[in-house]
Structures are given as structure tokens and as C-alpha cells.
Amino acid sequence: MPRHGRLLASIAAAGLLLAGCGSGPSQVGAAAIVGDNRIPVSDVQSWFGEVLAKEPGLKPQLQQQGNLDELGRQLAAQLVRQELVEQAARDERLTVTDQQVADLINRMGGPAAATSGKIYTPQNLREVARTQLLATELGRKYFDRLDITFDYSQATTRGEAEEKAKRMAQGPAEAAAVVTADAKAGVPAALDQKLRATDSPQLAATTPLFGAQPGTVLAFEPETNSGQWLIARIKERRADAPPAVPAGGADDQTLQGVGMHLLGITADRVGVRLSPRYGVWDRVNLVAVPSEGETTGFRMSAPAAAG
């Protein structure tokens, strides 16, 4: 496949991947705000220019296909994820060395091969590699200790999944009522299901199930465009369960996926605000999408008690 074709495909796959007021950092001129840290629009624009300079024939193709905005969205989302990784790494006291970064780039074939047909450029490749390594270390730290208890049901449409998620987010009693009624109606549903990350590495690496605190309701398609939605309310979550299988049993790609999905907890804690020029922040898959109706699912918490 021509390199422009690979890059266009990577942009499409990534898609599947402001005046402000009040307290906190101003959103004026910000692509996003992650916690107290501001990501300037200029950072996205600079990266955007570097990609187009690296791939001179790309801009007209993106314009023809209407994907120019999509490239900006994916660059903004990558910068948000990089900031989330840095904040999580500080919290968890995780570090990687310059030599580890260099070794990873060498394993990718060097800067030219690592960036060919991708949205990464030689200018930011080290930061991208650092993010991947830190996410892998975050996954390695917790993979064999993650244990959740959850209630779940299923749905066949996005609308049905959203409606059930909203009801289950009202609290444990309403969640139990939804699950019990669905089970009686023959819908796959159950209460108090227990699962360890080591029992299902794929779920841990590709879904947000293990990256949500108790009380969070998640609704998503475990397999994209399958028409089968899982709605789960996390009841209990342990990150210190006695190891059952050493983390060394999982490869780095799996551990990186686990680490990236654990960033959902960091994002919930610090907050992510994305400039409307880049669309909407998808709290389930930690990507930027054009509109609320195009998120990969729903992530809800029980409403705060009045008082």
C-alpha cells in the first residue's frame, strides 16, 4: 500500500481510536485542558504542519476525502493521551529512561521507518515512544492485580444501551432492577459477576472495564459495529489482588492496551476539556470524535446526592 494510503488508513483507524470562564486554566487558545494543564492549539497546529511537510501529497487527499479535520482531531487526542500518561506516571512513580526510548525507536526500524505512513513525525517520535513505554509500565504494574465485580446487561442498539446505562447509573437498586428484569426476559444479564484482568487479557487491553472506579456505568460494544452492547456497572474494583498469573505472561502490546485504558480513571479524576474545534472527547475510548453521537459508548457515574 502506498505510504499515503497507509497514513489515511491510520487516520481512519484512529477515528475508531475556546472562550472560557470560571476557575482553572483558560480555554482561550487551548486545544484541550487536562486537569490543570493546558494544551495550546499551537501545539496541534505545529504537529499538523510537520505531518503535511513529511507527506507533501497528503493534504489534497485529505481535503478531497473531507478528512483534514479528522487529522487535527487525532493529533489533539494524542496530545491529551500523552498528558494523561504523564500525570498517571507521576502519580504511580513510573519512569522510563532515554535509553529505553531509543531502544524502542530502534526496534521500530529507526525514525524514518517508525514514522513512515503514520501521523508521527521525527520531531515528536521520542515523546510518542515515551508515552507507549509509560503506558506499558502502567499496565505491567496492575495487570495481574486487577479484579472487578460488576452487574451487567446487554442491548442491541446504541439508544437502548444509553437508556439502560442511564437507569443503571441511578444507583445499585435501579441497576439491579434493570439486570433482574432483563434476565427474566431472556436477555443475557447477571448480578455480581467477578472477573480478573488475567482471566481475559483481551477485555482488559481493549475495553474500559478495568479502568473505571466503583459506581461507574459503562456501555460499549466489545466488538466494534457488532450490534451487541455491554452495559456494566462496576460494583467493586481491586488493584491489589494477590497475583494469580505473573504480568510477564502478557506481551507488551497487551500491557500497553491495559495501561491506556487505565487512563480512564486518571481522566475521570482530573477532567478533560476538549476545544469544540476538535470535536468531543470520547470518555470510553479516550479519543476525539466529531460529535456526541459518534462516541464509542457511554461512561456515567451515579448522580451526587443532594445536600
Image: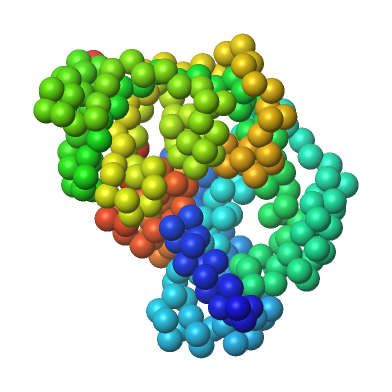
Q: Where is residue 38 in the image (x, y as percent from the top left)?
A: 55, 50
Q: Quadrant of residue 6?
A: bottom right
Tell me which residue sits at (29%, 42%) in the image: 229
Q: Is residue 124 above or below residue 141?
A: below
Q: How many marks?
A: 0
**Residue 283 visible (yes or no):** no
User: Where residue 205 sits: x, y (%)?
Assistant: 54, 39
- Asked if one can make out residue 278 in the rendered structure from this viewpoint, the answer is yes
Q: Hey, which quadrant is residue 187 in on the image?
A: top left
- Of residues 83 and 132, the one nearer the viewer is 132
Q: Nearer the viewer, residue 217 or 152?
A: 152
- Say left or right for 24 vs 143: left
The percent position of residue 132, horizontal first and vertical second, equals 68, 47
Farthest top residue? 242
Q: In which quarter of the image is residue 268?
A: top left
The quarter in which the N terminus is drawn is: bottom right
Who's the residue at 79% across and 52% down the image? 104
Q: In which quarter of the image is the C terminus?
A: top left
Which residue, as the protein is rendered here, is positioned at the far front? Answer: 186
Q: Which residue is drawn at 52% across and 70% down?
A: 9
The residue depicted at 17 percent of the width and 20 percent of the height is 180
Find residue 27 and report its horizontal and vertical position in percent: 46, 54
Q: Is residue 49 above or below residue 251?
A: below
- Check the image and tell me how it is coloured: rainbow
Horizontal placement of 228 versus 128: left or right? left
